[in-house]
Amino acid sequence: MKKLGITLSIIAFSLQLTAQETVLEKRDKTLPDMTVVDMDGNTINPSKVTNDGKPIIVNFWATWCAPCKRELSAINDLYQDWVDESGVKIIAVSIDDERTKSRVKPFVDGEGWEYDIWMDPNWDFKRAMGVNNPPFTFLLDGNGKIVYEHNNYSPGDENILHAKLLELVNEAKKEDPKK
Amino acid sequence: MKKLLVVATLLIFSTHLLFAQKDLGELSGNISSYFQYLRTDSTIGATQPPEKALINSFANINYRIRGFKAGVRVESYLPRIQGYPDRFDGTGLGYRYVGYSNDFVDVTLGNFYDQFGSGMLFRAWESNTLGYDNMMDGIRLAVHPYKGITIKGVYGNQRFAFQNGKVIKSDGITRGVDLDVNFKTIFPKLEKSKFSLSMGGSFVSKFQKADDPVLNLPQNVGAYGGRMRFGYSGFFIDGEYVIKENDPSSDNKYIYNKGKGVLLNMGYSMKGLGILFSAKSVDNMSFRSDRTKDLQDLYINYLPSLTKTHTYNLVATLYPYTTQPLGEVSFQGDVIYTIPKGSKLGGKYGTNIAVNFSTAYQPVHHTSGINQNDSSRVTYRAVPFDKSNLKFWQDFNIEITRKFNKTFKAKLCYYNIQLNNNIVEVSSTAHGIINSHIVVADLLFRINDKHSIRTELQGLFTKQDRGGWTTFVIEYTISPGWYISVMDQYNYGNPIKSDRTNYLYGSVGYIRGSSRISVSYGRQRAGLFCVGGICRYVPASNGLTISFTQSF
C-alpha cells in the first residue's frame, strides 16, 4: 500500500511537472470572447475564429499610422508565398475611430490588400488584448493560442514573423507527419 | 506517513486536474511609464518645473474565466508630464469593472467605455497619450435576442478628473439605449449575396439638477437619432441623423435651440481603387453631462472631424483642425489608386497615389422673424448643410508612394493647408486664414534584411504666423530590436531673426517582443498634439525623456 502510495505520488508529481511546463509556455493566451465587427458591420466573436488548424496573424493598425502601413504593405508583397507555405490567415484590426473609419475600406482596396479586416473604433478589442500602441502583431498557432507577439515595426521584422510561422509549420508536421 | 502521502497525492492530483483543464483563466494587459527630466531653455521658452522630473504611469489588467471578466487600471501622475491636462494627479485606482458575457448577454458593472453609432450622441473613450478619459461608472448591458440584433443600455456617471489618486465623477447622470439590426445576419438568404443592410437607433439622456434663479433650465435633456448603412458589392453608403433637445449650457451661452447633426459617407472600391466622399453638418451639438463645463470636460458625445489624420511632423502639429461643436458644415473626398505593377507607369511593384480634399465652413444662422430677446431663447434657425462663405479650414493633399526595388522605396507628398486662425486659434500673431504649403520626401533604404535607413525631408512655406519651417529626420533601424533617430526642426523663415531656432531631438529605442524602451533627449517645439479629433497644447521643452511599455 505504502509502495502504491509512493508510486502514485511520483506519477502525480511528474504529471504535475509536465502540466506545468505547458502552462509556463506562453501558450495560454487566446483571443477574447467579445464582439467585433468587419467592414460590412457583420459581428464576429474573436474567440470563435479558426483557420482549419492553420496559424492566424492578428495585426493592430490604423490608416494614420505610418509604420503600420509600411508593415502591412511589406507583408502584402509576401502574403501569397506565406499562404502557400503555411495556410496562414492575416486579420488586420483597424483601430481607426469615427473620424477615419470610413476611409478604411477604400484604403484597403486601393492598396490591394487581401487581409481580413476587423474594425475596433472604440478600442475595446485593443484594450482586451493589452495592446498599447499600433503596430502590434500576434501570431496564433493552429489551436488559437498566442505563441508570439511583437510591438513596433522596423523593416525586416516581417522576416522574423515569417521564421516564427515556419517554426509553427514544422512543429505541426512533427506532431502529425501526415500533414 | 501513509495519510500524508494520500493527502499529498490527492492534492497533487487535484491541482493537476486544475492545470490540465487550464481553468486558471486568462490574464492580459499592459504597463507603460513616461518619464521626463526637464531643463530651462530661454531660447525656446522652456521652463523647468519645481520638481525637475515628471512621470506618468499606467497598468491595465484584464482577467477572464468562463464568461466572467474583471479588470483594473492603476494610474500614477507624480506629477503629470508637461502639457498633460491638470485633470490627472496622484496614484490610485482609475478604473475597475466586473462582468459576465455569453452568446446572449454581456453585462459590465463599474467602469466601461462604449459608443453608439458614429458617437455623435454617445461615446465614452480614453486616450492616455492625449490625457482624455470620459469613462462611465455604472452599468452596461448588451443583449443579443436574435442573431444580428443587439440592444444595449448604459447608465452611469462620467469620469471628470483624477485627483489625489481618486476618480472625481460628474454630478450629472448619463443614460442611453441603442438598437442595432443587421439584416444580412438575420436573413440567411442574404448571407451569400452582395447586399448588406443595417440600421440602428439611439436615445441618450442626461440628468443634472438645476436651481438657476433666472433661467428655467431643463434638468433632463434627451437626444436621439437614427442611422443606416447600405452596401452592394464595392459600393457603400452610410449616414446618421441626430437631434438634441434644448440644452442651455455655457458652451451655447444658454440658448434654448435644439441641436442637430448629420453625417454621410459614400464610397466605392475595387482592387486597386478606392473612392470616398463624406459630408457632415453640425449645429449646437456640444453635449456634456455638466452644462457649466468647457474644454474637454464631461463630453457625452464625440463629433468626428472630416479631415485626414496626418502623420508628418510639420503637417500634423502646426495647423491642425478640430470640429467646431457649435456649428460647422464640412466635406471630404478621397481617391486612392494603385497604378498596377508591371505597367509602364506603375513600375515593378506598382505605384500608389492618394489624393484627399477636405473643407469646413460656418453654417448660416437665420434670424429673420426671430425675436432675440423673447422668453423662448431660441435665437436662430439653422438648416443642415446651409453654409456661409466663412471658411474655417481647407486641406488639399497628394501622396505618391513607389517601391523602386527591393532596397529603395520613396514617398513624395504635397499639402496645402488653410486654417482660419480667428476660429481655431493656433497663433497669436496671425489673422484670418493661415495659408501653408508643405512638401515631404520620405525615403527608405533597406541595406539588408535587418538594417535600414529612413529619412524625411519636410519643408513648410507660409508668409503668415512664424514663417517657414524645415524638418529633417534620419532613422536607422536594426530589425527587430533597435532604432536610433535624430530629428531637427528649423524655423528658418521666422520674421524675427533671433527666433530662427533649431530644435534638435535624438532617440534610441529597444524592442523585444512586447517590451519597448526608448530614451530621448533634446528640444521639442511648443505645439498642438492631436490624436483622433482631439488636440492638446504641449509647451516647449528641453530635456530627457524615458518611456517604457510592456504588454502581456
Image (tube, rainbow, N blue to C red):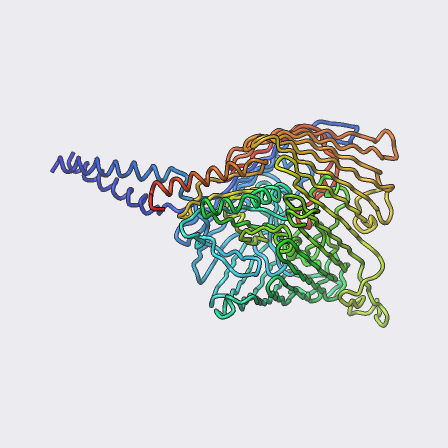
Looking at the image, the residue that sits furthest to the bottom is B369
Q: Can you give x and y, in whole percent of width and height, for residue A65 in the image?
A: 63, 44
Looking at the image, the residue that sits furthest to the left is A1
In the image, what residue occupies the spot 76% across and 42% down? Answer: B318
Q: Can you give x and y, in whole percent of width and height, for residue B131 in the image?
A: 64, 44
B173 lies left or right of B419: left
In the image, what residue occupies the spot 25% across and 36% down? Answer: A13
Q: Nearer the viewer, residue B466 or A139?
A: A139
| Quarter residue B116 falls in | bottom right
B393 lies left or right of B109: right
Q: Nearer the viewer, residue B377 or A77?
A: A77
The answer to whether residue B290 is seen in the rendering is no
B322 lies left or right of A163: right
Above or below, B510 relative to B224 = above
Above or below, B265 relative to A131 = below
Q: Can you give x and y, in whole percent of width and height, for residue B390 in the image?
A: 84, 57
Q: How many marks?
A: 0
Q: Nearer the viewer, residue B285 or A113?
A: A113
- Location of the N terminus of chain A by quadrant is top left
The answer to whether residue B323 is seen in the rendering is yes
Q: Can you give x and y, in whole percent of width and height, for residue B152 in the image?
A: 53, 63
B91 lies left or right of B460: left
